[in-house]
Image: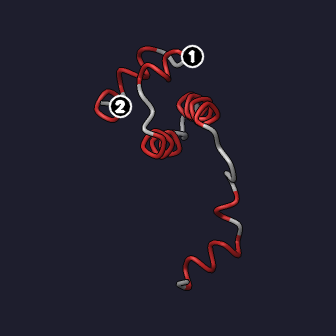
Amino acid sequence: MGKAKKRSLHLGINDRITNLSREDAVLATIEALRKPSGGHDAYNLITLFGLTAEELLEAGASYETIKSLQGLLE
C-alpha cells in the first residue's frame, strides 16, 4: 500500500460511504444536485453507479437539471 493511500485510510477520508445501495445513491445524487456546490459529488455518483436520467426523474429530480446533464447521462 502506498503512502498516500495509507494516509487517506488513516484520516478516514474513505469512511464517508460504507455501504450504499442504488436507491440511496439516486437519492444522494438528487440531494447533491440541489446544492450549489454538490456537482462534483453528483458526477461521482452518476458515473460510479451508471445512473440513468429516467431513474433520477422518477426519484424527483427536475427536468431542467437532468437536461443540463444530458452529455453525462447518455
Q: Is residue 28 above or below residue 41?
A: above
- Residue 60 x/y as whole percent: 57, 16
| Quadrant location of the N terminus in the rendered image | bottom right
Q: Element under label 1?
A: loop
Question: Which quadrant of the view contains residue 24?
Answer: top right
- What residue type is disc 2 on? Leu
Question: Which secondary structure lies at badge 2?
Answer: helix
74 with respect to 44 (left or right): left
Q: Quadrant of the C terminus?
A: top left
Report which residue position mark 1 lands on.
Answer: 60
Q: What residue is rendered at 67% in x and 51% in y?
A: 17
Report if the CB atoms under discs 2 and 1 are less than 8 Å apart. Answer: no
Residue appearing at x 53%, y 84% in the figure:
2
Q: Identify the residue position indicated by label 2 in the image.
A: 73
Disc 1 marks which amino acid? Gly
Q: Residues within 10 Å of mark 2 (few under 14, many from 20)?
A: some
Q: Considering only vertical position in the picture, is 2 above or below 8? A: below
3D distance between C-alphas at marks 2 and 1: 16 Å
| Residue at x 55% of width, y 34% of height | 29
| Disc assigned to residue 25 | none
Residue at horizontal 33 percent and vertical 35 percent from the top: 72
